[in-house]
Amino acid sequence: MKTAILTDSTAYIPKEVREKLQIKMIPLSVIFGQESYREEIDMTAEQFWKEIKEREDLPTTSQPPIGEFVNMYEELAKEYDAVISIHLSSGISGTFNGAVTAGQMVEGIKVYPYDSEISCMAQGFYAIEAAELAKEGKSPEEILKRLDEMKQSLRAYFMVDDLSHLKRGGRLSGAQAFVGSLLQIKPVLHFVDKVIVPYEKIRTRKKALKRIYELFDEVASQNVPLRATIIHANRPDDAEKMKQELAQKYPHVEFYISYFGPVIGTHLGEGAIGLGWYKK
């Protein structure tokens, strides 16, 4: 049985990794005024951060139309028997539900939608692991079992510099955003039950990053093999510095650098930075 692996653009997997592992990608879109751009196709993260500085209004975001999912699945049906369709958390986007609906509309291919319950490169790790297993000839059921195992150890914590984006996007309540900005709070956030919630409220960026490092150390210091990713919103130099520091301290960890692209960046704002990991 030949199994395709599909994810959406919010996994922010580097193009060369997608191509090497034959991971298919369906884009979400970011909308500036009347103009819609498919992230990773029409607009890169670098272009997005440049564009957003030149505009007063925040863009909006949209999930892939169901018709695009149907077209993608029908195209994959020409070459594959099954597709595992891995998407960002259903608690913050309707993308996963779109995959479910489209999967029921196509013939000739068995669609296995998978809710990562997270986003960005943490979501990308599911797609990478699934693609590696698919290359080994594992069945969809075996791959999904491994993804569920990963979910037990996969964690991601991130810090936002400006709470106004989360507030305007409806991802954080107004009162929380107001109090946070008033006290210069840099909350450490994470996903719980598919939605973004504060893990701890911390006063400064430096202390928030230190707390994220501590949370990572609780697992990494056990010397178990890990895959980890540093995710940044237009802070490549900070991310590279973090990677060098962490890689030196934890040589048994495989580190990636990724980014918050246009869709997730719209909700988190520039300067956000995070760390995600799971046990290999």
Image (cartoon, rainbow, N blue to C red):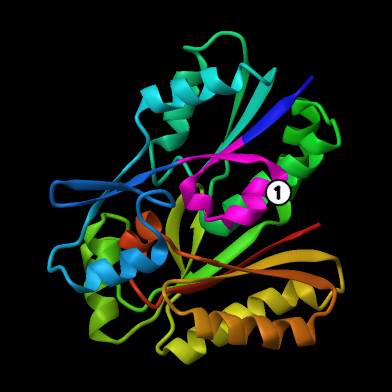
Mark 1 is on which residue type? Lys
State left or right for residue 54 relative to residue 143: left
Measuring from the top left, give residue 272's x and y in whole percent: 42, 74
Q: Identify the residue shown where x is 63% and y is 67%.
A: 229
Q: In the figure, residue 84 lies in which quadrant?
A: top right
Q: Is residue 230 above or below residue 102?
A: below
**Residue at image mark 1:** 20
Of 113 and 258, nearer the camera is 258
Magenta region: which residues? 6-26
The secondary structure type at the circle numbered 1 is helix
Q: Is residue 212 left or right of residue 153?
A: left
**Quick one: 135 or 254, which is closer to the camera?**
135
Question: Which of the two residues, 231 or 118, is positioned nearer the viewer here?
Answer: 231
Quarter of the image for the N terminus: give it: top right
Question: What residue is drawn where x is 42% and y is 36%?
Answer: 95
Q: Is 83 on the left-hand or right-hand side of 68?
A: right
